[in-house]
Image: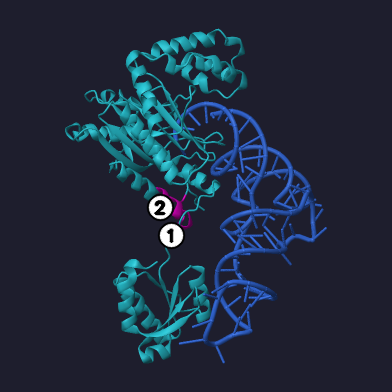
Chain colours: A cyan, B blue
Amino acid sequence: MFQAPRGTSDHLPEEQKYWRYIESKAMEVAARFGFGRIDTPAFEDSNLFIRSVGEGTDIVEKEMYTFEDRGGDSVTLRPEGTAPVCRAYLEHGMHNLPQPVRMYYFCPVFRYERPQAGRFRQHHQFGVEVLGDADPSVDAEVIEVAWDLMTSLGLKEINLLINSVGDPECRPAYVAKLREYYSGHRSVLCADCTERLERNPLRLLDCKVETCRALGNDAPRSADNLCEPCSEHWSKLLSYLDSMQLPYQVDHRMVRGLDYYTRTVFEVQPVNGGGQSTICGGGRYDGLITELGGRETPGIGFATGLERLTLNLKSGEVPVPDEPSPRYLVANVGDNARLAALDLSVRLRRAGVGAILSSGTRGLRGQMRQANALNIPYALILGDDEIEKGEVVVRDMHSSIQESKPLDEFIEEAAKSHGNSS
RNA sequence: GCGAGCGUAGCCAAGUGGUCUAAGGCGCCUGUCUGUGGCACAGGAGAUCACGGGUUCGAAUCCCGUCGCUCGCCCCA
């Protein structure tokens, strides 16, 4: 038997209500904030991601689905959503549009990782990007989009964490300072952190080993070591967030794994989250567009994982509306009735009304059971008697009240009311 | 990539070497109710016990490998 590849999963019809729910809320929020949808290819030139995400990152080093196509070009299944959007911005000359350009996307993303709860090799993201405006009010707006989405989804017990990681002006000095601080405590660092000290000192801050955590408390803080412009950006952002009354917490330990982030970074995490709990992450990337060969263009965005959101909706017992069932099930008894039932269901559908033909190989009893199991509000019954009189029995499955109606009259009424039916 | 646990019908599961031609529950189908659902009762279908190999007179049960899932690390949505 075949099974879905490791780390991938099927989203069965019974799961779809969560996806529809998230998609509809996200599109609603995006529309409210003036974002336009963009869809980009599932794969891109490999160099796009190597350049943007960063050569030293785990994503590029060991997680990309990279292969040579039949023409000999190296292509990569999209491991994140921001770089393709930036590529599209450049390719289509969007700097000629009114700035900033606000876009959102839904897309699958692919990373070759070890699967775990909340971590997959193919997962799906909703993300937004704002390109062409460096003002901290844009940061505040994007953070508001993220928070607005989380709260409109009905998620509770979540934290909004923000930090500033500076820019190429001030970050090197900060990293050096950090390295110096930790070097003084080399003897108590865990093995991983000793390694990190050389490769990526920022990562020392979010180590989970107790002794390293303790050191992190007194470590130099990024937000205290910003250059003048970054510092001004940071303090303005904080004042905007305050006036917007967003319940943020500054987290000096938060660093993010993609090289392109500058200044503002933020995440949304469940209060009682485990290892892979971040449900939303993003930040500013003012250097990314130039890295991809464009003129200097600031940008900021975030992405959320639909699978993780779904997990949180379920564990938080957030009520999610059911997918609508068809309004009618057409039951039938006897061979003549089967044809008449087929005809009736066709006429209803062509009139825009949801109807399914029940399996006539079952008895009426079985067909009623089916209507009940499928949560269909009305059963229509056709038998020899009804056909002879040109009528149909309409049974309200909720109240169990049923009545005979002339067939044509019924179809006309059904067609008329389908717009405002439940 | 590292460490650990797990894998019995669509789902949840009992069973830890012979009594397993594998219990029970949910769901599905049928009947009681010959043209009427939700309840109840009865019956039925559905499992090469993840896959492959080994040990043994005998394996769902022990051993090895593979695949997959889960948890922690790493990383991230």
- Residue A199 colored in magenta in the image: no
Front-lying residue, A74 or A363: A363
- Is A70 positioned to the left or the right of A326 in the image? left
| Residue at horizontal 39 percent and vertical 87 percent from the top | A336
Determine the image quadrant of residue A287: top left
Quadrant for the C terminus of chain A, please: bottom left
Specify the subunit that label 2 lies on: A
Q: Looking at the image, is mark 2 or mark 1 earlier in the sequence?
A: 2
Identified by mark 1, the residue type is Glu
| Residue at horizontal 44 percent and vertical 86 percent from the top | A334
Mark linked to residue A323: 1
C-alpha distance separating marks 2 and 1? 8 Å
Main secondary structure found in the magenta portion? helix
Identified by mark 2, the residue type is Arg
Determine the image quadrant of residue A103: top left
Circle 2: element type: helix
In the rendered image, is residue A28 in sight? yes
Give how far across and how far down residue A390 sits, in percent.
35, 88
Label 1 crowd bin: few (<14), some (14–19), many (20+), radius 10 Å: some
**Label 1 near label 2: C-beta < 8 Å?**
yes
Front-lying residue, B12 or A4: B12
Q: Which residues are magenta?
A: A10-22
- Is A188 positioned to the left or the right of A36 in the image? right
Mark linked to residue A80: none
- Is A39 positioned to the left or the right of A395 in the image? left
